[in-house]
Amino acid sequence: MKFKAIFFDLDGTLIDTTNVTLSSLQKVLQEELGIKKTLAELSFTLGIPGLRALESFIKDNKLRNHINELWMEAVAQQSDELQLFPGVTSIVKQLAASEIITGIVTSQTATEFQTEFSQFGLNKYFNLIVNASMTKKHKPDPAPIVYAIKKINISPDDFLYVGDTAYDLESAHRAGTKFALAQWGTDKKTKLTTADYLLKKPSDILNLA
Protein backbone atom coordinates (compact mmCIF):
# COMPACT_ATOMS: atom_id res chain seq x y z
CA MET A 1 0.00 0.00 0.00
CA LYS A 2 1.53 3.31 -1.10
CA PHE A 3 -0.77 5.62 0.87
CA LYS A 4 -2.81 5.17 4.02
CA ALA A 5 -5.21 7.95 3.05
CA ILE A 6 -6.51 9.20 -0.31
CA PHE A 7 -8.57 12.37 -0.32
CA PHE A 8 -10.30 14.06 -3.24
CA ASP A 9 -11.19 17.50 -4.43
CA LEU A 10 -14.85 17.69 -5.50
CA ASP A 11 -15.52 20.03 -8.44
CA GLY A 12 -13.75 18.84 -11.56
CA THR A 13 -12.44 15.74 -9.80
CA LEU A 14 -15.43 13.73 -8.62
CA ILE A 15 -18.22 15.82 -10.15
CA ASP A 16 -18.30 17.41 -13.59
CA THR A 17 -19.47 20.83 -12.40
CA THR A 18 -17.58 23.16 -14.71
CA ASN A 19 -20.34 24.15 -17.13
CA VAL A 20 -23.07 24.51 -14.51
CA THR A 21 -20.86 26.50 -12.13
CA LEU A 22 -19.50 28.89 -14.74
CA SER A 23 -22.70 29.39 -16.72
CA SER A 24 -24.57 30.15 -13.49
CA LEU A 25 -21.97 32.75 -12.49
CA GLN A 26 -21.97 34.23 -15.98
CA LYS A 27 -25.74 34.65 -15.88
CA VAL A 28 -25.82 36.20 -12.40
CA LEU A 29 -23.02 38.67 -13.12
CA GLN A 30 -24.68 39.84 -16.31
CA GLU A 31 -28.23 40.05 -14.96
CA GLU A 32 -27.38 41.63 -11.60
CA LEU A 33 -24.29 43.72 -12.33
CA GLY A 34 -24.19 44.10 -16.10
CA ILE A 35 -20.81 42.35 -16.20
CA LYS A 36 -20.30 40.30 -19.33
CA LYS A 37 -17.65 37.58 -19.20
CA THR A 38 -16.96 34.50 -21.27
CA LEU A 39 -16.83 31.12 -19.57
CA ALA A 40 -13.08 31.05 -20.24
CA GLU A 41 -12.66 34.38 -18.46
CA LEU A 42 -14.48 32.98 -15.44
CA SER A 43 -12.55 29.71 -15.28
CA PHE A 44 -10.18 31.11 -12.62
CA THR A 45 -13.05 30.85 -10.13
CA LEU A 46 -12.97 27.05 -10.21
CA GLY A 47 -11.42 25.46 -7.14
CA ILE A 48 -11.75 28.40 -4.73
CA PRO A 49 -14.65 29.50 -2.48
CA GLY A 50 -17.33 31.54 -4.21
CA LEU A 51 -16.95 34.62 -2.02
CA ARG A 52 -13.24 34.76 -2.74
CA ALA A 53 -13.86 34.37 -6.46
CA LEU A 54 -16.32 37.26 -6.40
CA GLU A 55 -13.74 39.60 -4.86
CA SER A 56 -12.45 40.15 -8.40
CA PHE A 57 -15.75 41.76 -9.36
CA ILE A 58 -17.29 43.14 -6.16
CA LYS A 59 -15.61 45.09 -3.37
CA ASP A 60 -18.65 45.68 -1.17
CA ASN A 61 -19.07 42.80 1.31
CA LYS A 62 -22.86 43.00 1.51
CA LEU A 63 -23.28 42.99 -2.26
CA ARG A 64 -20.73 40.21 -2.66
CA ASN A 65 -22.64 38.02 -0.18
CA HIS A 66 -25.88 38.74 -2.03
CA ILE A 67 -24.43 37.85 -5.42
CA ASN A 68 -22.89 34.70 -3.98
CA GLU A 69 -26.29 33.62 -2.67
CA LEU A 70 -27.82 34.21 -6.10
CA TRP A 71 -25.01 32.22 -7.68
CA MET A 72 -25.60 29.30 -5.29
CA GLU A 73 -29.33 29.42 -6.04
CA ALA A 74 -28.63 29.37 -9.78
CA VAL A 75 -26.37 26.33 -9.40
CA ALA A 76 -28.97 24.59 -7.21
CA GLN A 77 -31.59 25.10 -9.92
CA GLN A 78 -29.36 23.17 -12.31
CA SER A 79 -28.15 20.55 -9.82
CA ASP A 80 -29.95 17.80 -11.74
CA GLU A 81 -27.55 18.48 -14.62
CA LEU A 82 -24.50 17.64 -12.51
CA GLN A 83 -22.89 14.26 -13.10
CA LEU A 84 -20.15 12.19 -11.56
CA PHE A 85 -17.25 11.53 -13.89
CA PRO A 86 -17.38 8.02 -15.40
CA GLY A 87 -15.76 5.48 -13.11
CA VAL A 88 -15.90 7.60 -9.96
CA THR A 89 -18.62 5.63 -8.17
CA SER A 90 -16.80 2.32 -8.65
CA ILE A 91 -13.46 3.68 -7.44
CA VAL A 92 -14.96 5.36 -4.39
CA LYS A 93 -16.64 2.11 -3.36
CA GLN A 94 -13.52 0.03 -3.97
CA LEU A 95 -11.35 2.34 -1.88
CA ALA A 96 -13.94 2.41 0.90
CA ALA A 97 -13.90 -1.38 1.01
CA SER A 98 -10.12 -1.38 1.49
CA GLU A 99 -8.04 -0.35 4.50
CA ILE A 100 -7.40 3.09 3.00
CA ILE A 101 -8.86 6.14 4.73
CA THR A 102 -10.86 8.11 2.17
CA GLY A 103 -12.13 11.66 2.25
CA ILE A 104 -12.96 14.90 0.47
CA VAL A 105 -11.39 18.33 0.86
CA THR A 106 -13.47 20.88 -1.03
CA SER A 107 -13.79 24.64 -1.34
CA GLN A 108 -17.56 24.26 -1.32
CA THR A 109 -19.47 25.37 1.75
CA ALA A 110 -21.55 22.88 3.69
CA THR A 111 -24.69 24.09 1.88
CA GLU A 112 -23.10 23.83 -1.56
CA PHE A 113 -21.83 20.35 -0.75
CA GLN A 114 -25.28 19.23 0.33
CA THR A 115 -26.82 20.58 -2.88
CA GLU A 116 -24.27 19.28 -5.34
CA PHE A 117 -22.76 16.06 -4.00
CA SER A 118 -25.09 14.49 -1.46
CA GLN A 119 -27.62 13.70 -4.21
CA PHE A 120 -25.31 10.94 -5.47
CA GLY A 121 -25.52 8.93 -2.25
CA LEU A 122 -21.76 8.50 -1.82
CA ASN A 123 -21.21 10.43 1.43
CA LYS A 124 -21.19 7.23 3.48
CA TYR A 125 -18.15 5.91 1.61
CA PHE A 126 -15.88 8.68 2.93
CA ASN A 127 -14.31 8.71 6.39
CA LEU A 128 -14.02 12.50 6.49
CA ILE A 129 -15.44 15.40 4.48
CA VAL A 130 -13.79 18.80 4.89
CA ASN A 131 -15.74 21.72 3.43
CA ALA A 132 -14.99 25.44 3.30
CA SER A 133 -17.10 26.06 6.39
CA MET A 134 -14.62 24.12 8.54
CA THR A 135 -11.45 26.20 8.07
CA LYS A 136 -10.77 29.93 8.06
CA LYS A 137 -8.29 29.67 5.19
CA HIS A 138 -8.88 27.83 1.95
CA LYS A 139 -7.01 26.41 -1.03
CA PRO A 140 -4.40 27.23 -2.24
CA ASP A 141 -3.59 27.68 1.46
CA PRO A 142 -2.65 24.30 2.99
CA ALA A 143 -5.07 24.74 5.92
CA PRO A 144 -7.88 22.45 4.67
CA ILE A 145 -5.52 19.56 3.92
CA VAL A 146 -3.58 20.08 7.15
CA TYR A 147 -6.93 19.97 8.97
CA ALA A 148 -7.76 16.65 7.30
CA ILE A 149 -4.36 15.15 8.13
CA LYS A 150 -4.70 16.12 11.79
CA LYS A 151 -8.26 14.79 12.03
CA ILE A 152 -7.27 11.32 10.79
CA ASN A 153 -3.97 11.46 12.68
CA ILE A 154 -1.49 10.27 10.05
CA SER A 155 1.78 11.51 8.59
CA PRO A 156 1.64 13.81 5.53
CA ASP A 157 3.85 11.22 3.81
CA ASP A 158 0.99 8.73 4.01
CA PHE A 159 -1.58 11.14 2.54
CA LEU A 160 -2.42 11.62 -1.17
CA TYR A 161 -4.59 14.44 -2.49
CA VAL A 162 -6.31 14.07 -5.86
CA GLY A 163 -7.42 17.24 -7.64
CA ASP A 164 -7.65 19.04 -10.95
CA THR A 165 -6.40 22.61 -10.44
CA ALA A 166 -3.25 24.51 -9.58
CA TYR A 167 -4.98 25.51 -6.32
CA ASP A 168 -5.26 21.84 -5.38
CA LEU A 169 -1.62 21.15 -6.21
CA GLU A 170 -0.32 24.14 -4.25
CA SER A 171 -2.44 23.32 -1.21
CA ALA A 172 -1.24 19.70 -1.19
CA HIS A 173 2.44 20.50 -1.60
CA ARG A 174 2.36 23.27 1.01
CA ALA A 175 0.78 20.75 3.40
CA GLY A 176 3.68 18.38 2.73
CA THR A 177 1.64 15.76 0.87
CA LYS A 178 1.80 14.18 -2.57
CA PHE A 179 -0.55 15.35 -5.30
CA ALA A 180 -2.20 13.36 -8.11
CA LEU A 181 -3.63 15.29 -11.06
CA ALA A 182 -7.08 14.14 -12.19
CA GLN A 183 -6.55 14.71 -15.89
CA TRP A 184 -10.14 13.76 -16.73
CA GLY A 185 -11.31 17.00 -15.11
CA THR A 186 -8.39 19.26 -15.95
CA ASP A 187 -8.43 22.06 -18.50
CA LYS A 188 -6.22 20.70 -21.24
CA LYS A 189 -4.40 24.04 -21.38
CA THR A 190 -3.34 23.65 -17.77
CA LYS A 191 0.16 22.27 -17.39
CA LEU A 192 0.75 21.13 -13.83
CA THR A 193 4.20 19.72 -14.40
CA THR A 194 4.98 19.51 -10.68
CA ALA A 195 2.18 17.02 -9.97
CA ASP A 196 3.59 13.88 -8.37
CA TYR A 197 1.26 11.58 -10.29
CA LEU A 198 -0.79 11.93 -13.47
CA LEU A 199 -4.09 10.06 -13.55
CA LYS A 200 -5.75 9.63 -16.94
CA LYS A 201 -8.85 7.94 -15.54
CA PRO A 202 -10.27 7.34 -12.02
CA SER A 203 -9.24 3.66 -12.01
CA ASP A 204 -5.57 4.74 -12.18
CA ILE A 205 -5.92 5.66 -8.51
CA LEU A 206 -5.86 1.96 -7.66
CA ASN A 207 -2.21 1.87 -8.72
CA LEU A 208 -1.45 4.16 -5.78
CA ALA A 209 -3.59 2.35 -3.23
Image (tube, rainbow, N blue to C red):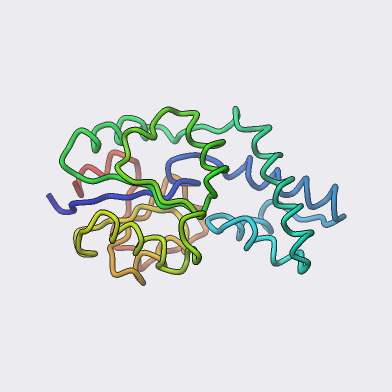
Count of numbered circles on the image: 0
Quadrant of residue 60 in the image? Answer: bottom right
In the rendered image, residue 19, in percent from the top left (x then y), is placed at 62, 42
Please provide percent x and percent y for residue 173. 34, 69
Q: Residue at x 24, y 38 (%)?
A: 95
Question: Residue at the location (79% across, 52% down)?
Answer: 29
Q: Residue furthest left?
A: 1
Q: Relative to residue 98, is residue 185 drawn left or right?
A: right
Task: Tell me: 153 left or right of 65.
Answer: left
196 or 200: which is nearer to us? Answer: 196
In the displayed structure, does residue 207 sit left or right of residue 65? left
> Residue 8: horizontal and vertical position, in percent?
37, 49
Q: In the image, is residue 180 above or below residue 86?
A: below
Closest to the observer: 149 or 200? 149
Q: Is residue 197 above or below residue 194?
A: above
Q: Answer with the quarter of the image where residue 92 lies.
A: top left
Residue 199: image location, x then y, percent: 32, 49
Residue drawn where x is 28% and y is 65% of the image: 177
* Above or below for 80 versus 20: above
As drawn, is 169 to the left or to the right of 40? left
| Residue pictured at 63% horizontal, 40% vertical | 20
